[in-house]
Image: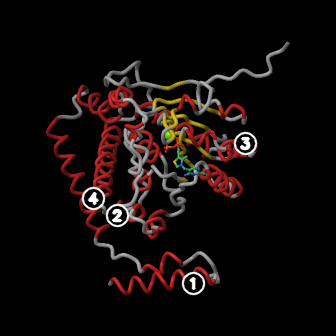
Amino acid sequence: MKTQYEGKITLTEYLAPSGELLHPLPDTAPDRETLLRYYEKMVLARQFDNKAIALQRTGQLGTYASLAGSEAIDVVTALQMTQSDVLVPYYRNHIMQHLRGMDLADVLLYWGGDERGNSAEAQHQDLPNCVPIATQCLHACGVATAIKYREEARAVVTVLGDGATSKGDFLEALNVAGIWQLPVVFIINNNQWAISVPRALQTIAPTLAQKALGAGIRGEQVDGNDVFAMHERVSQALERARSGKGPTVIEAVSYRLSDHTTADDATRYRSPDALKTGWEREPIKRLQTYLHQQGAWDAEQEQALQNTVADAIQQAVDRYLATPAQPVASMFEHLYAEMPRSLRQQRDIAVAREEETS
Ligand SMILES: Cc1ncc(C[n+]2csc(CCOP(=O)(O)OP(=O)(O)O)c2C)c(N)n1
Ligand SMILES: [Mg+2]
């Protein structure tokens, strides 16, 4: 018997949860300025997240999907992308959208139930938020096909959850990305949960990254709480995509520090111990400890940053809250060239109610 194929999945990690380096950094490691930028934006992500949850709890925002735990994945990936690359996001990538140009007020507008936030001009060629699980992977392949056809040196990045890797859409996307050698980078945000379904019940495969191997494409694991590991692996995957070397799957191993969304209560299915371990491994504290040990960060700088970020977020919140609501009839627009009679009736009833209550 001959061995026809043997697969291997590597895990890249540099920074331990304690903030110590596990092994020496490569020459390509981010410099101090880049690290501080990562840190600043991760703090922004965390504060934004807390604010959005507070807005939802006080009736000023709709259901919101927290990004807590994925700050390193999202910030490093977004800051490694160039403006001409394309982001095909899912519903936790608020800070990626912002780092690529979207006003946080528009992000809030969308989560406040106003579709205008989802069509912000500052999104440029990035795709809008995608809620149907894993479908964004196929959209990403569509965009990547256009880029390849035009022979442009651009990468497409799409992000999906661990649960999404069980969907046919993901597997179909991998297959076409492989056979057409598309310039796409799939980032799996493995936060260990798909609502209440734990990673262990999702698949018997020891890694999610190995699903790439079946499609003949490169797959690897990265510590998703480690900015050094994310920086190295994402920049290589982007470069491969831009230079015509094909797709990559990066399984960024992390932990969901929040409920699934504000409509969920994870205390009903998750042990406090598991969450505690998640917090011990979280990405922001880890980088802060490292920077502090390097003499690159102190308590005064921390306070100044927290204040600046809080002001910026409050200004975005003010802009969001000051945005006049759309008339109720707007939710019936853009659906049909010619609206069916039943919808026209519903619209007329809604408009009449709006007039009664205003
Ligand atoms: C096609 C489809 N089926 C079901 C849902 C309901 N749903 C919303 S989030 C979710 C779990 C997704 O888990 P995962 O892919 O791990 O992403 P995470 O939310 O953990 O980031 C499900 C099943 C959906 N949005 N779309
Ligand atoms: Mg998940």
**Residue occupying the far left of the picture:** 300
Q: Mark 1 points at which residue?
A: 344
Cα distance between the residues tagged 4 and 1: 33 Å
| x 39%, y 19%: residue | 22
Single out the mark in the foreground, 1 or 2: 1
Tags 4 and 3 touching, CB below 8 Å: no
Residue 105: mark: 2
Report if residue 277 is visible in the image: yes
Q: Is mark 2 within 8 Å of ligand 1?
A: no
Find numbered disc 2 in the image and state the secondary structure of the residue it sits on.
helix
Cα distance between the residues tagged 2 and 3: 37 Å
Amino acid at pointer 3: Asn
Cα distance between the residues tagged 4 and 2: 17 Å
Single out the mark in the foreground, 4 or 2: 4
**Residue occupying the far right of the picture:** 1
Amino acid at pointer 1: Arg
Q: Earlier in the sequence, mark 3 or mark 1?
A: 3
Q: Say whether residue 182 is left or right of residue 54.
A: right
Tags 3 and 1 touching, CB below 8 Å: no
Q: Where is residue 74 in the image (x, y as percent from the top left)?
A: 44, 44
Q: Mark 3 points at which residue?
A: 175
Tags 1 and 2 touching, CB below 8 Å: no
Find numbered disc 1 in the image and state the secondary structure of the residue it sits on.
helix
Q: Mark 4 points at which residue?
A: 58
| x 41%, y 59%: residue | 101
Find numbered disc 4 in the image and state the secondary structure of the residue it sits on.
loop
